Amino acid sequence: GGTGLGKTHLLHCIGNEVLRKNPERRVRYETSDRFITEFISSIKQDKIHSFRQKYEKLDLLLLDDIQFFSNKEQTQEIFFHIFNALHEKQKHIVMSSDMVPQKIDGLPERIKSRLNWGLVVDIQAPALETKMAILQKKSESLGIALDTDTAELIASAGTSNVRELEGLLTRI
């Protein structure tokens, strides 16, 4: 899904729910940028093995913005091995991206095919009614009374980015 549609929020919700139901599970949320930076550091410090182990011991890996692995061959290689190790142990990996795996340029087919093994969900921009519900929920959390007509007016402002929508409410 596109920017501001809740992909990161969804990853955090998944992780929190898994930990709520199974507190002993090893869950890690990681941005792709942080994964890449940490991987580069592990190369410099000659600690690639411990880097791999850190991820391969997880029960659930939540990886945000996988499209940033594009054209990063060494990162793709280590990710490929981590993915395979987790898959072999029947562990779970949940990833987000701003596009479906087939459309991510600079990713090898072997990674794209693995990304397509699971459930691929295209998160679309919310409809007017959903935007209104988001605004009303947000206004409640802020202690602001927001009537339906005002919510509809703000929701019809033309943005599909939920962050921008909440920003409109904040400014108003």
Image (spheres, rainbow, N blue to C red):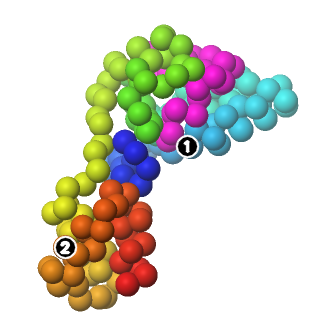
Q: Earlier in the sequence, mark 1 or mark 2?
A: 1
Q: Which is in the foreground here, disc 1 or disc 2? A: 2
The residue located at (36%, 78%) in the rendering is 169
Amino acid of disc 1: Glu
Residue under the image location 52 percent in, 22 percent down: 105
> What residue is shown at x 20% (from left), y 56% (from top)?
127
- Numbered tag placed on residue 155 in the rendering: none
Identified at 35% across, 20% down, the residue is 116
The quadrant holding residue 80 is top right
Left/right placement of residue 92 relative to residue 36 reads left
For the record, the magenta segment spans 63-88
The dominant secondary structure in magenta is helix
Percent coordinates x, y for residue 148 in the rendering = 14, 79
Q: Secondary structure at mark 2?
A: helix
The CA span between labels 1 and 2 is 36 Å
**Secondary element type, mark 1:** strand
Q: Position of residue 43 (x, y in %)?
A: 79, 26
62 and 113: which is toward the camera? 113
Q: Residues within 10 Å of mark 2 (few under 14, many from 20)?
A: some
Residue 10 painted magenta: no
Q: Which of these two is toward me, 95 or 68?
A: 68
Determine if residue 10 is in view: yes
Q: Which residue is mark 1?
A: 30
* Residue that protrudes farthest toward the top in the picture: 110
The front one of 142 and 27 is 142
Residue hosting label 2: 152
